Image (tube, rainbow, N blue to C red):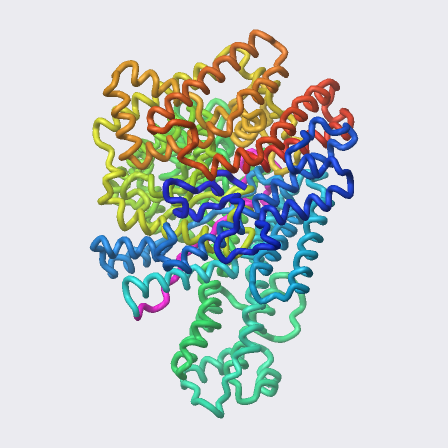
Amino acid sequence: MSIAMRDNQTEKPFAEGAQTRESAVAEGGFEQGGASVRGLLLQQLSSVVRRRHPDLARVLNGTLSVRDLDEALWLDGLQAIAAWFQLLTIAEEYTATSRRRAIERRGSADAVLGSFSNVIGQFMADGGSGDEVRRTLAGLRVGPTMTAHPTETKRVTVLEIHRRIYRTLTEAEEQRWSPRERDELIERLRGEIELLWLTGELRLEKPSVDQEVAWGLHFFREILFETGPKLGDVLTAAIRRHASENSTPVSPNLRFATWIGGDRDGNPFVTADLTRAALSEYRKSALASYLKPLERLIVELSVSTSVCMIPETFRDALEGALGLSGRREAIASRNLNEPFRQFVCAVAARLRATLAGDAGERRETDAMPYRSPSEMRGEIQALHQALVEIGAPAVAERLVRPLLWQLEIFGFHTASLDIRQNATIVNKVVAELLNLGRDEDDHVQKGEPGWSERLREALRSDRKPDLDAADLSDDARETVALFRVMREAKTRDNRAIGAFILSMTESADDMIACHLLARWGGITAGDDPSAATTLAIVPLFETIDDLRAAPDILDEMIAIPAIRRSLRECGDRQEIMLGYSDSNKDGGFLTSNWELSKAQRLLHDVGVKRRVRVSFFHGRGGSVSRGGAPTGRAIAAQPAETVDGALRLTEQGEVVSSKFANKGTALHNLEILSASVLAHTLKSPRERELKDDAEFKEAMEALSGLSQTAYADLISTDGFIDYFNQSSPVEELALLNIGSRPARRFGGSPKDLSELRAIPWVFAWSQNRHLMTGWYGIGTAFDSFVKVRGEDGMKLLQSMFRNSRLFRLIVDEVEKQHYQCDPAIGAEYAKLVKNETVRDTIFGKIEAEYELTRRMLVEVTGTKDLAERFPVHKRQIDRVAAQLEGVHRLQVELLSRVRGTADVREADPRALDALLLSIHCTSAGLGWTG
């Protein structure tokens, strides 16, 4: 689980529904013999592991280090610790849910900070109007986007055990059980914990992309399909409470997307054929998911014509539905005088025919398959309206409204599949296609004179290259096939394909190249070869230089007539994706955050000037270094007016399972996300904390420059790459098999940091407890700023901390990340570095910056001790410190052993398994991987 997602506490600990590892259960929570949930779970796990060896229970209670176990017990000791850390996470999720319920019981939904009721109530109390709330909600578009980024070390099998443990705890909290029944629940709990202990933590093989698709669909099928519509109920209740008592139900306006099966940036395993298969799986899952609510309707809709008159309009709709069902007589005879059941049976018959047709199976009836989700939704809307007209609005809302919202949210596609590709590949393919049939001396590539003009000439032309030329390269053939798959999918269901994300966008030329591929691939508004493309093409700005260039790139791009026409086809909206991970890896934490904030303001201004609505897609990860932060606070700190009712963000790896593994938690997280977008849209134009005056901007520019210089000095130190590779398990991480894609985009050398992805970069620094990616450079920046400006400089930093939402968020996240560092443990990893001079120089710099950062944080925040403002976070780290220290010291020894062989894969299998399990333990204890 992401620390960023579980530690949401600020001075107001429930603003994000803080998930805590408290020693006492919330009011109304489950207690067994006076023990807390945490105590109960420890008791059950200890009883399980003690049967293997008594010393394992001592490892769990912190009285014996796993490093001091007999070597034959190392694997068992690590497995016990990993299971305990997972149970702690379940306990804190349970406690968080119990606390939110207790808050609501004592007050109301208004008391849960960040909820819809809280946001709307505050807005109305501050003089806002219900009409403004409803207008904003009508245009709200919130897009959680699932990705298979390799940061989730737990398999679906383990996630299912977690869910059963959580559900057992939830069931056991009810007061209605007899002592015997309660004992049975405890026995069931012990059985699940035993399964967890006996289930292998490590993946034996790297997951395939097909398996990653199945992993993502697990959350949609089991959790989100049911939870998504409930968000509409929560929102409607808040509107009726504060803005309009008689308000009609308000749509949740969720638009899920996914990258799983579409993200081919540096992943050679994602092919056009695999993308087609993924689209098929998403569609099949959506269609199959509607069968259960339809079956429920068939069971419960027992309305009889002998009791009420059926509206004439519905009689006509029923006749049409029965006629298309292929089973008119069978349905009518089985459900005599029950027109609503007949209607739903007809809908179910058509849905089954749609599923069978997709699978290429022979249909059992002559039912007409649905051509689109809107066709099915129209029929369900007719059913809802008829129930309202006969005087059964409660039945319509309880039974039919959720299905309407499910169709609105998930359609026949489950989640829109984004396609991501690197600009390097796109430009290479476009150059190859443009050069077809030209003399070799007339060939041109990106970066060469004439490239920009050649692109623009092609964009003005109606000439289309031969996409089936016999001599195309493999990259070109694959890219052409991909765009054909996208065209087919959009033709069948426009929402099946989301956006084309162009990673590492460096210029307007990159975007032109992508528009050319979309046009040549036939994803256009008409058959005219020069027609505007209807594909949403989204630039992804990732490095510091690209973020700084982004506003000019956008301005230049929108000024191109062909692209402007395409934007009109997309509703005069241009989505921009912002990369938190690579910008941090490129420039350090402070510089990354400041440049991301600046870019949003300037990109928004370009949109206003060009009359194009710019919306942002935030590529955040789970860790602080990759943009992880409490969702509500992160959105609240975005520049004024830049959210404007629309926001997308990635939900990556372990963040997906931490947010969406259980229905109550999933609903809360979706509410916090949506309510935060609503709050920013309604209030940000008038919020003082988001207004950056000249003094603030000047100070941030100075701090950013100082921080980036310090960070650049560290990573450019002679021997830095050797230090990184040797003092961390960065190369061994690939053996964890937690993702299908390689750790390096284009298979670069371990000596080349530029090709290393941000996830293993952050993952490795967390394993050795340096965690420098989340704080390095801040101390030097603050100290240098104060040395130049004197006492006034410190007063300004303290004022910024009090009054700037962005600066406060940066300082808070740095402080929490800094508290997780452990120089003593880091020094043990540093001993793995062979060159003593390199080791002493680089670890010396990191240790000195650590101390300076600690001192400056305390002074700027006005506290006595580090993390005293975050007592829950502090307790979380302190609580696992003893076990983690043993894990780290064992990991250092195992790294030394494994690296003693010429090929790590030829190392002693037990030592290698123990090493990988120690990596898993560390990520579970810290709460995140990368």
Q: Relative to 587, is 280 on the left or the right?
A: right
Q: Relative to 256, is 559 on the left or the right?
A: left
Q: Residue furthest front?
A: 34
What percent of the width, then of the height, locates residue 472? 57, 35
User: Residue at the location (49% across, 92% down)?
Assistant: 306
What percent of the width, then of the height, locates residue 307? 47, 91
Above or below, 155 relative to 218: above
Q: Which residues are magenta?
A: 246-272
What percent of the width, then of the height, locates residue 154? 63, 42
Residue 486 visible to the viewer: no
User: Residue at the location (74% across, 36% down)?
Assistant: 76
How many numbered marks, from 0 up? 0
Above or below, 228 relative to 278: below
What percent of the width, then of the height, locates residue 180? 68, 64
Q: Camera-side residue: 100 or 410?
A: 100
Q: Camera-side residue: 304 or 184?
A: 184
Q: Dividing the image into 4 quarters, which one contains the C terminus? A: top right
Q: Residue furthest bottom?
A: 306
Magenta stretch, main secondary structure class: loop
Q: Dividing the image into 4 quarters, which one contains the N terminus? A: top right
| The quadrant where residue 185 appears | bottom right
Q: Camera-side residue: 525 or 426?
A: 426
Q: Is residue 187 magenta?
A: no
Residue 605 visible to the viewer: yes
Above or below, 692 relative to 217: above
Q: Is residue 271 magenta?
A: yes
| The quadrant where residue 9 appears | top left
| The quadrant where residue 788 appears | top left
User: Residue at the location (69% across, 19% down)?
Assistant: 896
